Image (cartoon, rainbow, N blue to C red):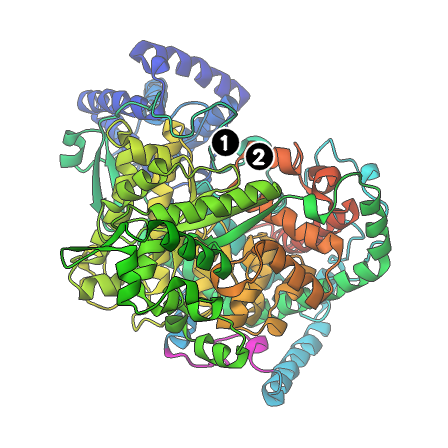
Amino acid sequence: MDDEIEEMEEDMEEVMEEVGLSSCKSSVHMSHKTRDVLKHCETRNKECGLFINSVSEQTLCSPFLCCTVGKSKRNYVHFLVWSFKTAQQHWGKCLSDKNKSLVPDNKNLHILKLVLLFLLASNPTDEMPRNFPKMSLCEMDESVLLLAEKVYASALKEENNRDAMALFTVPEDCPIGLHEERERELQKGLAEQRSEESARRMKNFKQKPLCSPPEPCQASPQENLPDFQRVTISGDYCAGITVEDYEQASKSLLKALFVREKYSRLAFHRFHRTTARFLRSAEDTTWSEEDEVLPAISPCPGVGQDPYSMEDIPKDLGYQLQMKDGIVHVYASQGALEQQEPLCLPYPNLETFAVDLSHVLAMIADGPTKTYCHRRLNFLASKFNLHEMLNEMAELKELKKVPHRDFYNVRKVDTHIHAAACMNQKHLLKFIQETYETEAERAVLERGGEKLTLGQVFRDLTMNPYDLTVDSLDVHAVSNAFKAAGRQTFHRFDKFNSKYNPVGASELREIYLKTDNYIKGEYFARLIKEVAHGLEESKYQHAEPRLSIYGRSPDEWLTLASWFIQHRLHSPNLRWMIQVPRIYDIFKSRKLIPNFAKMLENIFLPLFEATVNPQKNKEVHVFLKYLTGFDSVDDESKHSDHMFSFSSPKPESWTTDENPPYTYYLFHMYANIMVLNNLRKERGLNTFQFRPHCGEAGSITHLVSAFLTADNISHGLNLKKSPVLQYLYYLAQVPIAMSPLSNNSLFLEYSKNPLREFLHKGLCLSLSTDDPMQFHYTKEALMEEYAIAAQLWKLSTCDVCEIARNSVLQSGLSHQEKQHFLGPNYLQDGPEGNNIRRTNVAQIRVSYRHETLCNELSFLVDAVKMEAAAMPGQ
């Protein structure tokens, strides 16, 4: 193999130099030139042309190609050798019996190697092509498909189907079902004890006292681990379930992790390093830092730099764009558009997504997997209680030795906050009174062709701003009359949304809380700048406010970008996100858009245009530098009568007034973000994360969709209902921004919030405010959120600092900022990635979290490897 690699390296250098590919600066330029060369080869040699098709089929369908092979040239050439051999075997099997004259002989092999190089030279040698590997529903196991449909149907009908949903999601005061299930488990266990094969395999599964990643970093030797009292369990770790159930659960969980990794890598989302190491171990390969895919986020402008500068803007690429099946496709030229030959970008496939989604959905209804996950989660909770009892004082001693650092001066990011409610109610009231005092004669609203001054607006509302109080302002979801207010908004998202209207007047909302109004959003901008000034004064608090893009018109982006630049809203303590409300049904009923595809086009096409031709879209280009991600928002408890599946209508055909289901929204948003990220990465621009609201209410199927498509989520309350999903979110360390004060007013009482339970089990959580205007009283809403959580749940200093560290990790802050706030090695696993002098998180705590996650992942990998070793012939 090494000789072949060296030979192909030499051939590659020579051939690429001959045709001028070596001088191409990007994969896009290379692809154009390569296409011409290939057409010439196919015309002159039918044999080579047919072989090229075989190579294309084999390489593009390879699961190995769906993720980056590696950035080293040697890995790339190694992949060429593998592709060539695989295609050669496939070619021989297909044609040897049909037309032996077409089979390449040894004489032509060298020529074909060069053709293969031309074919794969459409991508630079330092980065592999990124294709979306397609799958078909016919490849699915019918039982898996039936289970997935059963779970979906149960969610659609709002039934509590005990057979489809997890045993452990039913109320615990239903002893009959629990007794029957336990009896069945007991009978299975007794049958296994009588099996010699099961007894032999069980002996192989023994608990490890301490598990490290498969390839530990050289910088983190075992002797440097903190010294603390570790909790270990001896004996086999599949105790309580049969070996067959344990192996089945392990395979299912690993498959789900592989699926999430695929979707994360293709969209330049983060995937936890520790989990990635164990997945590579399951494949008998080695993980390396070169294989890691991270989002590209623009660093904060330095001192003296103009954040709004429009100099050195990239040139126009001249690409053509077209919305096709709800996804923007990119073409190199008008000719390529006419021939429907898009650029080599990973365009997602709805059928493949439906297959992957069905596999994870089926796990929810799979008995062995539910039982295993339920037991492991209970163990994690109990293990942390023991760890806390044994090491709480040791963690506290560690923190007391840290100079200058405490909870108040560690960095915290409000990872989920809406810009329209980022101020508290007292702040808004004071601002309204101040503007009325100084600008009462200013025209602020146009209605029916008539311009109204601020004074006229208040006179029409028959009120005097000086008489207003926070109670009469009525923007709080919780008032002094708590019970009455709670009844008004609890499970009533419509009434909650009305709280955005001060004193119930939509006119005041338009004047003070909108970016696109008669005064060009000036008041709203001034409010946000005052909030940003407060964050800058606190120094250690950051926020990621969401601004709305609705999809009514493509001009929304230019309006928003112009507002941002005109009012100079950049702040080092703010990172911006875009929220897309799921309100297609409203726009369609008002005949603002003809179909769902038009809404998607209005949202995403301007972003592609600003990426392809920034010179023509300068304002949007500048604004996008400070944008870190997208959110999907609305009331999750609203059910759609449509069940998402591969047969769901294409967005162009979705012309009814009915709103598409949650999963339909998420797939099409993710798909466009993924293509956009790959195009922007090609240009050296920043990428975006997908961070939807998920799991606040509604079906648990929402959490399955987000597990595949989201970098992180907001809320996640419904994870409590499914042990399988909760355990998957733990294994993948999917970040979750939780807002217990918000939930307390809308969907779940504070005392029942699962945040403390999730934290103890080791899920990656952060605290966020959601809407300070509606839920908080103090000027520092984020500190209020931390203070209430710490008091109610008796969280330690280490607990709240761990949550604060998580908030920085899951935020849209740049790599440089995270290095400054958390330490230069923050990406490393375990205690090596924690700088206690900056995070105030005890090394004992970080070590415990890391070792526990390694143990849980090792159980899955060991089970799969043991099963493979027991069946060497397969």
Q: What residue type is labelled 2?
A: Glu
Residue 337: image x %, image y %? 17, 35
Mark 2 element type: helix
In the rendering, which numbered label is found on residue 299?
Answer: 1
User: At 15% from the left edge and 61% from the top edge, which residue is drawn?
Assistant: 591
Q: In this view, does 260 lie to the left or right of 659?
A: right
Q: Quadrant of residue 643?
A: bottom left
Does residue 394 sit above or below 461 in this rendering? Answer: above
Question: Is the residue 645 above or below the residue 689 in the image?
Answer: below
Asked if the stretch drawn in magenta spans residue 163, the answer is: yes
Indicate yes or no whether the magenta region holds residue 573. no
Magenta part of the chain:
157-171
Residue at 74%, 31% in the rendered image: 219
Q: Are the residues flagged by discs 2 and 1 in contact, CB closer than 8 Å? A: yes
Left of 164 or right of it: where is 403? right
Crowd class of label 2 (few under 14; some 14 to 19; many from 20; radius 10 Å) = some
Q: Which of marks 2 and 1 is nearer the N terminus?
A: 1
- How far separated are the C-alphas under marks 2 and 1? 7 Å
Residue 696: % across, % down? 48, 66
Residue, x 61% and y 86% (percent of image)? 180
Q: Is the magenta stretch mostly helix, strand or loop?
A: loop
Q: Which amino acid does label 1 sit on?
A: Pro
Q: Which of 29 and 9 is in front in this view?
A: 29
Is any atom of residue 670 visible in this view?
A: no
Label of residue 817 in the image: 2
**Location of residue 167 by image quarter:** bottom right
Mark 1 surroundings within 10 Å by alpha-carbon count, few (fewer than 14), some (14 through 19), many (20 or more):
some
